[in-house]
Amino acid sequence: MGMTLTEKILARHAGKEKVEPGELILARVDLALGNDVTSPLAIQAFRSLGIGEVFDREKIALVPDHFTPNKDIRSADQARMMRDFAREQGIVNYFEVGRMGIEHVLLPDEGLVVPGDLVIGADSHTCTYGALCAFSTGVGSTDLAAAMISGEVWLKVPESVRIVLSGRPGKWVEGKDIILHIIGTIGVDGALYQSMEYAGDGLAALPMAWRFTISNMAIEAGAKNGIFPFDGVTKAYADGRSAREYAVVVADRDARYSGEIAVDLGALEPQVAFPHLPENSRPLSRVGNVPIDQVVVGSCTNGRIEDLRSACSVLRGRKVHGNVRMLVFPATQEIHLQAMREGLAEIFVEAGAAFSTPTCGPCLGGHMGILAQGERAVATTNRNFVGRMGHPESEVYLANPAVAAASAVLGRIGSPDEIS
């Protein structure tokens, strides 16, 4: 029996010819990631063991992106702990405020992740890098500490579910709609501790930005990781971002899968996930009249330049509704600059939106976009749990950037077609 993409990557990093689902392995990591929320716990664990040096100062990335720019004294102390550790250990890939970005956009854009890599991060959305045909998954802070010491991680090899995409998406349908549809079909535990492996002729219609979005939300289906096969789109991105050599991995024809899900991209319309779970998705045509108070465009899910372009294609020449606050968070400084060069920042500001520095702030209910009791928001983020973006009695609706922008103009959840 052959191996899946995930099994092949894990076998290579465990020094084995073959691995099987359920097997426990000790695998070497190519990159270990921490942020300003999770790194302090890992650093404390690291120090408590009396360890002097990290295993490799070039294979650890520390990104202060959640509560930065620091919102209070406590967050400033956490960021300082990470900063001091990075300086002490000579961490090459430490990204300070002003040079940082949202971690899961920053690292691949900086060329720190390439196809075939094994990446762990003390953040659940580390699964994003599967878009590059890498194995990446979230771990706890103690696992991060162990990896910083040894360069290895214990993993249980997951089963893989094959998701076959066919056709081409229609107007206003983006990567966010594809993954919301899948999660809406299988549920938030529908791929529990499995690898979501994508295949099919529909892959040709998916740009890299959409693949990142889809892989990013694998955890919202309970998956261990989401992974795309290597193709020309992957190669163009990887070669354009990194000079590192990488290994191209291909799933065996006789690989074993726990199941198969078919998705006809041409049959999809934009999706909206209602509170309080990503699985509560429904087609835009069945949303009804839902007035809103806030719109957020950004996050590790949809803060790339392609996402800002999508929102601006709807917002250009229009104004944000008088009852709505619109907040825009480009995911990195590079994206921020590109948005300025292309005039996107000007479109947002002229429309009445606030164009911000890169931060995860509002996505986790941290700062710069907290909802009050009874308020509703449309967000391009990845989660809409109770209290995720503020008050427990607020509501978050997940949508793609074009739908988010149209909703900002309409003052209610709506389609770009209503204002085009």
Image (cartoon, rainbow, N blue to C red):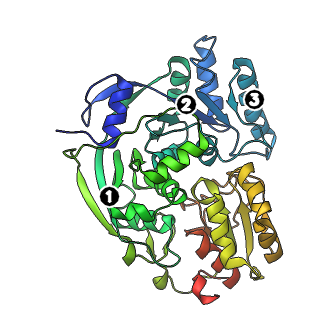
Tell whether 153 sits left or right of 76: left
Mark 1 vs mark 2, CA separation in Å: 28 Å
Relative to 179, is 215 above or below?
above
Relative to 312, is 361 above or below?
above
Of marks 1 and 3, the one in the foreground:
1
Mark 3 vs mark 2, CA separation in Å: 16 Å
Relative to 354, is 100 above or below?
above
Q: Mark 3 falls on what kind of element?
A: helix
Q: Mark 2 falls on what kind of element?
A: strand
- Mark positioned earlier in the residue sequence (1 or 2): 2
Q: How crowded is mark 3: few (under 14 residues within 10 Å), some or many (20 or more)?
A: some
Of marks 3 and 2, the one in the foreground:
2
Residue 91 placement: quadrant = top right
Residue depicted at x 55% and y 43%: 239
Relative to 187, is 195 above or below?
above
**Label 1–label 2 contact, CB within 8 A:** no
The N terminus, quarter of image:
top left
User: Residue at label 2?
Assistant: 32
The numbered disc on residue 163 is 1
Residue depicted at x 59% and y 80%: 413
Give coordinates of residue 411: x percent, y percent. Answer: 68, 82
> As shown in the figure, which amino acid type bears the numbered disc 1?
Ile
